Image (cartoon, helix red, strand yellow):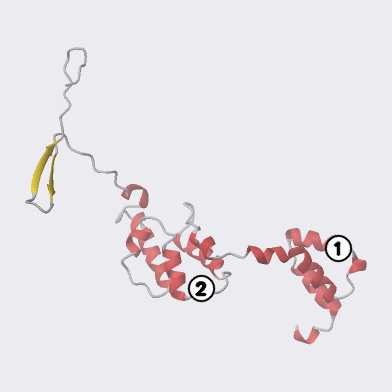
């Protein structure tokens, strides 16, 4: 195209062919009398769509992204990476991997936190291995791996010590056991 930078009609035609959707409708509604050169078209386009540059994704956008339940790990990684490429100033590789890992949920985050991955592609390979292990039942998915809070057992004994300036004292606390009797369901 560099050989045609002075051919306004060709530049306008190529630009027009590259438009789709709302931008194509915008172009078709332009007043031809106001567009006499490539520069006029470029200025009109920037006036109409300059706000889009203000909506470029940032690091917070990346942190808030989540893997959808219907997408594979690789699909999510590719979608996330496409957004990450648009962030300004550009992310360092280490920052990219840390931000991405922090968007993950169980079981991915659980298995990746301890690993020392060097690149984004290593993370994707590890994520796919975890995904396959979940599918084959070798590890639990995030939903079933969540553990409920431990319940106290009846009559559980708790020990407690106090350490002051004087001698230490130990206390034993027993949980009272609730007993229901048959007499009008009274509780003792």
Which residue lies at the image location 82% right of the left edge and 71% below the top edge?
41
Q: Could you tell me which quadrant the C terminus lies in?
A: top left
Apparent side of residue 129 relative to residue 165 in the rendered image (left or right): right
Helix, strand or loop under label 2: loop
Q: Is residue 139 above or below residue 119?
A: above
Q: Residues within 10 Å of mark 1 (few under 14, many from 20)?
A: few
How many marks overall? 2
The residue at 33%/59% (across/down) is 110
Whether residue 21 can be seen here = yes
Picture coordinates of residue 96 (x, y %)? 47, 70
What is the x, y in percent for residue 49?
Answer: 74, 64
Q: Which label is found at residue 171?
A: none
Q: Which residue is mark 2?
A: 91
Q: Tell whether 51 sits left or right of 139.
A: right
Q: Position of residue 43 (x, y in %)?
A: 80, 71
Quarter of the image for residue 106 reads: bottom left
Q: Nearer the viewer, residue 151 or 115?
A: 151
Relative horizontal placement of residue 122, taking residue 22 as reference (left or right) = left
Disc 2 residue crowd, few under 14, some 14–19, many 20+, Cα 10 Å: some
Q: Which residue ends up furthest to the left in the rendered image?
A: 167
For label 1, the SS is loop
Image point 49% across, 52% down: which residue? 70
Residue 132, visible in the rendered structure: no
Image quarter for residue 94?
A: bottom left
Q: Disc 1 marks which residue?
A: 30
Question: Which residue is the extreme one toward the bottom?
Answer: 3
Toward the front, the furthest residue is 165
Query: Quick one: quadrant of the N terminus?
Result: bottom right
> Of label 2 and label 1, which has the lower sequence position?
1
Indicate whether 175 appears above or below 55: above
Judge by depth and name the residue closer to the eye, 28 or 178.
178
């Amino acid at each position: 195209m560099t050989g045609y930078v002075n051919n306004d009609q060709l530049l306008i035609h190529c630009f027009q062919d590259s438009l789709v959707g709302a931008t194509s409708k915008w172009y078709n509604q332009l007043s031809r009398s106001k567009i006499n050169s490539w520069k006029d078209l470029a200025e009109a386009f920037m006036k109409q769509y300059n706000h889009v540059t203000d909506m470029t994704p940032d690091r917070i956008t990346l942190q808030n992204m989540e893997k959808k339940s219907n997408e594979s790990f690789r699909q999510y990684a590719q979608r996330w990476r496409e957004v990450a490429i648009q962030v300004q100033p550009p992310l360092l590789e280490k920052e990219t991997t840390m931000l991405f890992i922090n968007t993950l949920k169980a079981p991915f985050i659980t298995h990746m936190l301890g690993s020392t991955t060097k690149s984004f592609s290593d993370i994707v390979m590890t994520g796919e291995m975890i995904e396959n292990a979940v599918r084959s039942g070798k590890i639990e998915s995030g939903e079933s791996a969540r553990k409920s809070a431990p319940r106290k057992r009846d009559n559980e004994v708790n020990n407690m010590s106090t350490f002051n300036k004087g001698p230490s004292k130990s206390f034993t606390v027993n949980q009272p056991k609730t007993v229901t009797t048959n007499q009008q369901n009274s509780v003792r």
